[in-house]
Image (cartoon, grey):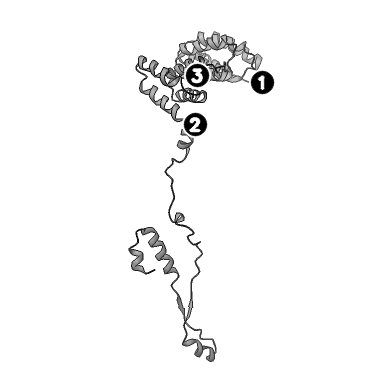
């Protein structure tokens, strides 16, 4: 292939690659060695010696290898995340977020689109709203799930939604779910107790936090240190309540130690 034909090629990348390959293969003329015999020099002087440099790079095996092939699909965590939600579920998520300020349109959308979702798509919508802190929409989806024929009381469905509500300081809605869960003979786990106690302390309701603490002591699950430590830290302005929790903590975890701040923090002199 001549250099002019290569330059007129429609594929400039392919043309440059082929030109480079041909340039690499240009023969190199070697001069005859002076130390060789006169007979060999006379016979080789008239015939030039050619040698081709050996390229260590592997040759192009196909045209696909000559460019960075990309099939158009997203790369990385974005594509893996989108695969977890089906098209129908994604349509419901976008539609509900668009109509979340209009209760009448939301109810109509739920009847026409949410109710026809499959079980896994409906749960995927619920989890997506919890992830985005759209707790009001998540609560609506949970109410729809409770009316389905396949619904069975599940502690983990309650747990995720209650934790999402507590983090968004929706403590009234969280406690309504709490009561419903207890009516279905389900007990929260330690993480649920911790987040609800933290939510009440953040909202300035130590009395409600202590009510959850008393409920936690009746749980069949073994106690963990984290809820106690959250209470001990959040009840610093309430020394009487804190001393009560501290006594229980020392009885249940005798090998653990709790931090006692200086008396000035309690307002005692």
User: What residue is shown with label 2?
Assistant: 84
Which of the numbered marks, if any, corresponds to residue 147?
none
The answer to whether residue 242 is visible is no
- Pointer 3 residue: 161
Label 2 packing within 10 angstroms: few (<14), some (14-19), many (20+): few
Where residue 64 sits in the image (x, y, percent)?
45, 54
Of badges 1 and 3, the one in the foreground is: 3
Residue that badge 1 annotates: 255
The quadrant where residue 187 appears: top right
Q: Nearer the viewer, residue 68 or 206?
A: 68
| In this view, 65 is above or below 101 | below
CB-based contact (under 8 Å), mark 2 and mark 1:
no
- Where's the N terminus, which quadrant? bottom left
Q: Is residue 115 left or right of residue 2?
A: right
Badge 1 element: loop
Q: Earlier in the sequence, mark 2 or mark 3?
A: 2
For marks 2 and 1, the one nearer the N-term is: 2
Question: What's the distance in space between the residues labelled 2 and 3, CA to CA?
Answer: 19 Å
Residue 259, relative to residue 48: is it above or below? above
Q: Could you tell which of marks 1 and 3 lies nearer the N-terminus?
A: 3
Are the residues at dot 1 and dot 3 in contact (C-beta closer than 8 Å)? no
Residue at horizontal 39 percent and vertical 15 percent from the top: 107
Specify the quadrant of the image occupied by residue 211. Answer: top right
Instruction: Report the front residue among 222 and 70.
Output: 70
Q: Counting other residues with Cα less than 10 Å from the Cα at mark 3, is it few (<14), some (14-19), or many (20 or more)?
A: many
Q: Percent x, y for residue 221?
A: 64, 16
- State the SS at label 3: helix
> In 3D space, how far apart are the residues under numbered discs 1 and 3 (Cα atoms)?
34 Å
Front residue of 125 and 211: 125
Question: In this figure, what is the number of numbered marks?
Answer: 3
């Amino acid at each position: 292939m001549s250099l002019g034909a290569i330059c007129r090629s429609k594929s400039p990348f392919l043309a440059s690659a082929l030109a480079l390959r041909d340039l690499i293969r240009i023969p190199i003329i070697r001069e005859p060695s002076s130390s060789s015999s006169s007979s060999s020099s006379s016979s080789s002087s008239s015939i030039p010696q050619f040698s081709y440099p050996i390229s260590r790079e592997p040759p192009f095996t196909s045209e696909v290898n000559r460019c960075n092939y990309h099939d158009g699909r997203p790369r990385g965590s974005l594509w893996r995340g989108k695969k977890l939600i089906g098209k129908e579920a994604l349509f419901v998520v976008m539609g509900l977020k668009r109509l979340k300020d209009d209760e009448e349109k939301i109810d109509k959308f739920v009847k026409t689109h949410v109710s026809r979702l499959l079980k896994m798509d409906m749960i995927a919508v619920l989890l997506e709203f919890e992830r985005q802190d759209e707790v009001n929409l998540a609560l609506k989806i949970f109410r729809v799930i409770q009316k389905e024929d396949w619904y069975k009381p599940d502690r983990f469905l309650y747990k995720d939604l209650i934790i999402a509500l507590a983090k968004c300081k929706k403590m009234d809605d969280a406690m309504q779910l709490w009561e419903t869960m207890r009516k279905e003979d389900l007990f929260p786990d330690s993480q649920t107790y911790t987040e609800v106690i933290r939510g009440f302390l953040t909202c300035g309701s130590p009395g409600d936090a202590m009510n959850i603490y008393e409920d936690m002591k009746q749980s069949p699950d073994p106690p963990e240190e984290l809820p106690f430590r959250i209470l001990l830290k959040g009840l610093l302005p309430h020394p009487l309540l804190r001393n009560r929790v501290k006594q229980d903590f020392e009885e249940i975890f005798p090998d653990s130690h709790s931090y006692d701040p200086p008396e000035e923090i309690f307002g005692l002199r």
